[in-house]
Amino acid sequence: MSCAVFIPGYSDYSSAKKYYKKGQFDLAAQHLSKSLTLKPNNKKAIRLFELSYNSAVSEHQRKINRLLLIENKSKWPRLVTEYSSLIKLGDHVKRLKSMLKNTVNYDLELIVDDFSDKLSDAKPRAADYHYNLGLKFQDEADKENQKKAAINFRLSQNFIPGYLDSKELYEKAKRNATYTLLIREFDGNRKYSSYIRDQIMLNQSNKSKEFLRIINRDELETIITELALVQSGITENNYLEIGELSGADHILSATMISSYQPAETITDTDIKQKKEVVIKKEAYVDSTGETKYKEIKGMVRATVDHYEKKSGAAITLSYKIININDRKVIYNGEVNGRKDYFHEWATYEGDKRALSSKFKYLVKLKDEFAPSKDDLIMVIAKDVSIKFAHKISNHYAN
């Protein structure tokens, strides 16, 4: 079985079987299409593709029939999805049909209906549904409704690019929905907390970018200079004043706590090892007069010193985001990171043949320097900054 992964198309065929068993027929057909492209003479894959295709088509047709009975216009985006899926399935069949005929002389007898007209009819209806939903939400001035409006104007363009004036309405609603976030200096070790803060400011997630603007370092320093404040003397009230001057909606603050376990080596000495091995061969003459050799076994011994070096560090970053208008905490949480270092090696005296497989490997290794405190914590800081960015992204993503 270990060699099977090197058979052309095996990976996709294996994935397709799993998807088929789960009832995910579209994915099964997709992977089988890839598999058969690499290995067209796989009869089992051909048969499974036929089953997957027919099952997928039947499933989509059932969904379409149910949706067509619905009076609400919300059905149109879902119908677009169903028709698009059927067209994609049909494309798999069209491509495989000619390929299988030319390579293995197999006639793929599957019916492919044309849904292009139905898709063309559904798309503008879906665009219109989201457009009108956007108009409904944009009448409310609060940011959450403006965000819903922007999302729906954007979705309308996914179905029909540039649908009516959806692009202009999207930009307007997006501006109204965007939150501006001021990130104050983090408490804790300045080197690492500043690094994490800078990463958050520089690498805002694409998920949150649509409706979140982070005040960058240059903007913040300009405001601080204008207020004649020095960084070390800024208080909570100063940040509230800075936030108001910058037009920020929210302020993010955080406290970082780090811990470090210095490298420690644990030694286990004088570990006895013994094993019966062939120590020599002795010649003898058998009854036919032929010279043969027999193995003489004996016990060999060794003693081992086993060394384990351990170190580790951790960071805990607790944070909160407050609304400047009412000073209330709207988000809070914690991000944790840890990095452990472990290395082991061994030395021995005596006969190497007496060593267990573990110690035969470890005696090949040597002592090494453990990473410094700074190296360990910086690795964690990088990981924590990514996790923290995801946290913020999840708070502000649509």
Image (cartoon, rainbow, N blue to C red):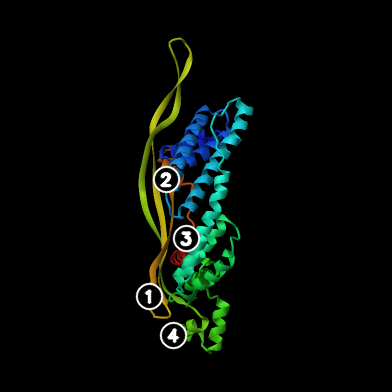
Q: Which residue is mark 3?
A: 370
Q: Which residue is mark 2?
A: 66
Find the distance from the CA under tag 3 to the CA under tag 1: 42 Å
Find the distance from the CA under tag 3 to the CA under tag 4: 40 Å
Q: Residues within 10 Å of mark 3 (few under 14, many from 20)?
A: some
Identify the mark at residue 329; answer none if there is no mark: 1
Identify the mark at residue 235; answer none if there is no mark: 4
Judged left or right of residue 260, residue 130 is right
Identify the mark at residue 263; answer none if there is no mark: none
Which badge, 1 or 4, is on the more N-terminal residue? 4
Tell which tag, 3 or 1, sits nearer the viewer. 1
10 up-or-down from 236: above or below:
above
Classify mark 1: helix, strand or loop. Answer: strand
Classify mark 3: helix, strand or loop. Answer: loop
Q: Quadrant of residue 353?
A: top left
Q: Position of residue 380 (x, y in %)?
A: 46, 64
**What's under tag 1, amino acid-wise?**
Val
Which badge, 3 or 1, is on the more N-terminal residue? 1
Classify mark 2: helix, strand or loop. Answer: helix
Residue at 60% of width from left, 29% of height from top? Answer: 100
